[in-house]
Image (cartoon, rainbow, N blue to C red):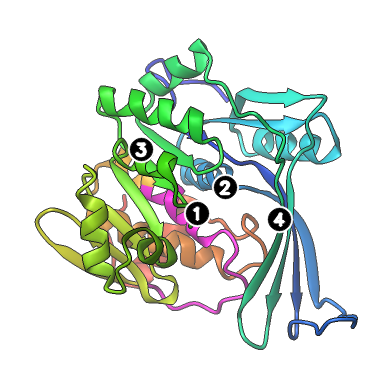
Amino acid sequence: MAKKAAGFDIVGLGLCIIDLVGLGSEYPKEDTKLELNECDWQAGGSAATGVVAARRLGASVTFMGHLGLDYFGEKILESLKNEGIDTSQVRVYHDVLSQYAFSFTSQSTGSRTMFINFNRHWNGYQLEQQACDEIERCRALVIDRHEITAGIKAATIAKRRGIPCVFDPSTRVDKEIKEILSLVSYPVLPIAFIEKFTGEKDLIKGARKVLKNGAEAVVVTCGERGSLLVTARNDAFLPAFKVKVVDTLGAGDVFHGAFAYALTQSWGLDKACVFANAVAALKCRHLGGRRGIPTMAQVNRFLRRHGHHFVK
C-alpha cells in the first residue's frame, strides 16, 4: 500500500492469528462426533481484524504484530497484504509458532465456543523507531490486549500527540490493563469486562468508573442490544441493526476498526457508534471474523435503508 505523506490513517498493533471456524446444529457431547454444516479458515486476531475492517472502509492502514516462520504465518501475512495493508512492521520469527484458534458456533442456540492456542513463550513485540514514527504520524491507533508492553508504549505516544486510541482489553484485568486504561482515549469494552473490572452490574455506572481513568469516552459493546456510549456529559444506548445472524466471531473486532475509522472522519461519537454497529451487523451475516466485513459502499446502502444519511 502506498503511504500518505502525513502517515497512515490507522495503525493497528496486536494479535494476528488463524481462525478455524465451524458451524454445526448443536454443540457436541463428549465422546461424540458432529458433522459440520459449514467450515472455513480465515486470518483473524483482535487488532488485525479491526484494521482489516478499517481498510475495507477506505482507510490507509499499517499493522504491527508477530508471526512464526510457518504455514499459518505465511497465510496470515498473505491475508493482510491481499487487503492492501502495509506489513513492513510485522515481525516474522523462525523460533516462534504462529497462533491459531478453533471457533464453533451452534445453530440451535447461536452460542460460540472457542479453543485458542496462544504462544506462551513469546516475549513481546518491540516497538522500534520506525514503528514509533508511524504511530506519531497516524490519525488513529487500534490496539488490543496481546502485545501489552508495546501497547502501553504506543498508547503513551498517541496520548502525547493527541491521537485517538481505540483499545480492546477483551476480559483481561491486571495492572498492565489498568495502566493502559489511563492512557487510551476510547476503550471499547465488552460487558464482561465492565463487570470484572469495576464490580458493577449496572453498565452505565461501570462505564463511568472506567471513564474516570481519563478516557474521552467509554463504549460498551452489547451484542444484539447494540452499544453504550458514555461521556462526561451524557450516556446513550445506540441500538443494534437487525440482521440474520450466522456467526458473531469478530463482531467486536470489526466494531473497533469501524469506530476508529469513524473517528478519522470526525462524524461525532454517536454517529461513530451507529456506523460501527452497522459494520459489525453486516459482518455477522457470514461465517468467520472477516468474510463478511463490508466495503463502504455496502455500509452506505445498508445505512440508507435504515434512514441514516450521514456518510457521504
Whether residue 89 appears in this view of the structure is yes
- Point 85% across, 34% down: residue: 70
Instruction: Measuring from the top left, give residue 49's x and y in whole percent.
Output: 57, 47
**Which label number is shown at residue 116?**
4
Q: Quadrant of residue 65?
A: top right
Instruction: Measuring from the top left, give residue 88's x and y in whole percent.
Output: 62, 20
**Which label number is shown at residue 179?**
3
Label whose residue precedes the other's in the sequence (3 or 2): 2
Label whose residue precedes the other's in the sequence (4 or 1): 4
Label 3 Cα crowd, 10 Å radius (few <14 / some 14-19 / many 20+): few
Q: Does residue 245 belong to the magenta stretch?
A: yes
Q: Quadrant of residue 147?
A: top right
Looking at the rendered image, the disc whose residue lies closer to the viewer, 4 or 3, is 3
The magenta-colored residue range is: 240-259
Label whose residue precedes the other's in the sequence (4 or 3): 4
Indicate the secondary structure of the residue bearing disc 3.
helix
Amino acid type at mark 3: Glu
